[in-house]
Amino acid sequence: MNLILKDLIAMSAAAVMSTVASAQTAKDIVGPSPLVAIENEPAPKLVVDPPLPEPLSRGLVFIQYRSENLRVVPVFGKGALDVSPRIGHVHITVDDAPWHFVDASGETIIVVGLKPGPHRVLVELADPTHHVIDRQTVSFDVPSKPDTP
């Protein structure tokens, strides 16, 4: 009985050690601390996914995005250019409109009310003074709604 107990304890300890060794750190997931300046920051990058298929099938456009080497926060103005780690926001333009809207939440972009057919959404990563750093365009088709009785 003692031997079985010792084996169980040894296996449990090995499992815990291997889990800890392979776990990602908070820094791996959320990036560097916003409280410590970063020397020689790499260039910011924007990553934009196509709209989520299920909401799009109902005419709702949900576009997920993320930025690398830039935190999306609601801070604006020339003084914010010196903040490290770098901060900014996104500009969103739908179907080449002459205007755009600004989002500083870092959350999924939601566009509703588009007519069925082809559409484009331009997502631009911008610094606190609205200077565009990176951009990506997502093209998609809003399906026709099924006929209702």
Image: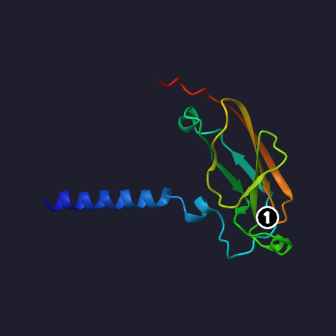
Does 124 sit above or below residue 3?
Answer: above
Task: Measuring from the top left, give residue 117's x and y in whole percent.
Answer: 69, 28
Rendered residue at 76%/66% (across/down): 86
Q: Residue furthest front?
A: 149
Does 107 sit above or below residue 49?
Answer: below
Q: In terms of secondary structure, where does tag 1 sit?
A: loop
Q: Which amino acid lies under the numbered mark 1 shown in the image of this protein?
A: Glu
Rendered residue at 74%/74% (across/down): 37
Quarter of the rendering containing residue 118 = top right
Left or right: residue 13 compared with residue 2: right
Rendered residue at 66%/30% (across/down): 116
Q: Nearer the viewer, residue 14 or 115?
A: 115
Left or right: residue 48 compared with residue 131: left
Rendered residue at 64%/40% (across/down): 113
Task: Measuring from the top left, give residue 17's x and y in whole percent.
Answer: 41, 61
Task: Measuring from the top left, give residue 80's x and y in whole percent.
Answer: 80, 72
Identify residue for label 1: 41
Colour scheme in the image? rainbow
Task: Measuring from the top left, give residue 82's x and y in whole percent.
Answer: 83, 73
Quarter of the rendering containing residue 6 = bottom left
Circle 1 packing at 10 Å, graded few (<14), some (14-19), many (20+), is: few
Q: Quadrant of the N terminus?
A: bottom left
Left or right: residue 29 compared with residue 21: right
Q: Nearer the viewer, residue 25 or 118?
A: 118
Q: How many marks?
A: 1
